[in-house]
Amino acid sequence: MRLQMRKRLLLLSSLFMLLCSLKAQNNTITIHADQKGANISPTMWGLFFEDINFAADGGVYAELVKNRSFEFNNPFMGWRRLMGRIPRGRLDVFNTGNPNNPRYIQIINNSADSTVGIQNEGFRGMGVQEGATYNFSVLIKKAGTKNPSLVIELVNSKGEVIGTTSLSGFTDKWNKHKAKLTATATEAKASLRVLVKGEGTLHMDMISLFPQDTWKGRENGFRKDLVQKLYDLKPGFIRFPGGCIVEGRDLANRYQWKNTVGKVEDRKVIINRWSSEIAQRSPADYYQSYGLGFYEYFLLAEDLGAEPLPILNCGMACQFNTGELVAMEQLDTYIQDALDLIEFANGAITTKWGKLRAEMGHPAPFNLKKLGVGNEQWGPEYITRAKAFTAVIKKKYPTIELIGSVGPYSGGENFEYLWKEMKTLKPELVDEHYYSPPNWFLRNARRYDTYDVSGPKIFAGEFAAHDRPLPDGRRKNNWYGALAEAAFMTGLERNARVVSMASYAPLFAHVDVWQWSPNLIWFNNLTSVATANYYVQQLFSTNKGSYVVPAIMNEKSIAGEDSLYVSATIDDRSNEIIIKLVNANPAQKNITINITGVTRIANKLTVTTLSNTDLQLENSVEQQTNIIPVKKEISISGNSFTYMAEASSMNVIRIQKN
């Protein structure tokens, strides 16, 4: 009897496996091109910027001098005294009491035939290119009757001079002096010498060196290669300034936008919260100069054709740190900061903050439409403050769309509580974050299938697949994570009725001094690399489409069936059907694609593919092309055709409707 039972179970098991196999082989996808679904928001795919991993100072902000105004806690951090074996002068740092920029350096040279000065190490060195020109500037005045000159030198890692210039003619009044240097060699770890030549005393502040070739050639500008990579993503928005930077470890160290505008020399330097956040990766020399402030941010958004999306502190410090709260009776200052930022962005030039924007060089408004209240706060304290912000902002600026938080996690008690409150508060968008293993993203491609379409729209404000860390703590930007994100993003696009915005996080990381990984773009002092994750984001953003249409297999949408993930859209501008197809299986798949609802399609399609069978492979600054998009044309005949999806691949198929 037991033997017969065992045989029956084996037979049933075999039949079940056969049926599963037959079902798996039935990979026929039908695209209903005439069934218009939800419109896709122009802001669907965007950017998240936070000053982490030396993303701003030492990164996209092109200043090469670290601690240029001597405002770090140690005023000589980043600087080395050049006095000679027998000192013939003196170096002093003076404090004027100015609350924003109190310090300057005094250099005294007592010898007519020698030099005394300082040398700046930059941000893990200064990256300079042979033949490139660099703009030096300094605020300077002389003291006394002597007239020393200034010698400025670029030196390589061996101490050899690879660029030089000089300045003279200083007065006893503070003035800005400028000079140009041309590098005679390429060097990733260059440094800058500033030498007083001849007898006399000079006072100096804001010692600065920028590449002349910044993004759009702007002074106080951005590093060109990094912004070009952002531009090539064609983002719909850029969220700024974070992230936990918004909150600060305590309220005194929170991000205050008013300290980041106006003259660069008047912006208040503070220590970056990421200088001590992660114990094993805590760079003590990580500060925020605010050279990249809110004005520069708005300019960047405008350059990229992206909507600005500021996130402001709501009176709460980071709840993972101090969790410090401002008293409710003092919250008005924080709310007023939000109102004033809207005025700075959009106000007439006759208003206080609109006038400042015009004085800084941009009389036209920046057309701010959205504002985030808090970063990833949670609990009833947040709800109380969010309600206060909402009431005041909506009364004065009813068209500004507000974004609320549901905390740092993708689920759980706090998440559920906050969502319940958000449905009552009714912000236009709710910000969800998820940093999870790749398998989580593969499993959650249907996350938004059952969300309430009448509630607030979803802003997936921070997400990234986190695979297992390496021994040094770094999590690779491997193809496995990028592929899982692509699968998940088909679910975001398919659910455009509830999902309006999404952004990978973080954006930038310096290979020598990162705190967090993975990241979208890695860089060193000379070059940058787009990760596999970057190319996934780019393929979605540049192949967005106008609205969703159904993509069906076995009578349902495709989100993991036989390891396939599919979304489809129509691009009204180009009159194309766009299919995004992810094959998360380690084997290639022969797929039949039927296009219904159109009389005829073109006899050729274009397909762009990202693929690799090595799921641990990644791009690096040394090997930048391990995983890159490959584009080709394929001939087809009729509205039904066969497509071979490569193993472990993301595919973007564009088909012209005739």
Image (spheres, rainbow, N blue to C red):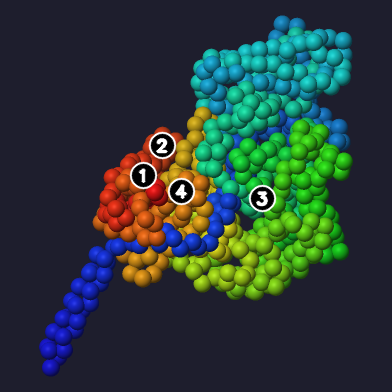
Q: Earlier in the sequence, mark 4 or mark 3?
A: 3
User: Which mark identifies residue 309?
Assistant: 3
Residue 596 image point, x, y percent? 37, 60
Q: Is residue 12 above or below residue 630?
A: below
| Residue type at numbered disc 1 | Thr
Instruction: Say left or right for 552 vs 330.
Output: left
Q: Earlier in the sequence, mark 2 or mark 4?
A: 4
> Which circle, 2 or 4, is nearer the viewer?
4
At horizontal 28% and vertical 45% (from top left) the residue drawn is 635
User: Which mark identifies residue 575?
Assistant: 4
Quick one: SS at disc 2? loop
- Provide the residue designation for mark 1: 606
Mark 4 nearby-residue class (10 Å; few <14, some 14–19, many ≥20): some
Q: What's the CA distance linking mark 1 and mark 4?
A: 14 Å
Q: Earlier in the sequence, mark 3 or mark 1?
A: 3
Quick one: SS at disc 1? strand
> Which circle, 3 or 1, is nearer the viewer?
1
Q: What's the CA distance linking mark 3 and mark 1?
A: 34 Å
Q: Earlier in the sequence, mark 2 or mark 3?
A: 3
Q: Is residue 414 above or below residue 589?
A: below
| Residue type at numbered disc 4 | Asn
Q: What's the CA distance linking mark 2 and mark 3?
A: 31 Å
- Provide the residue designation for mark 2: 624
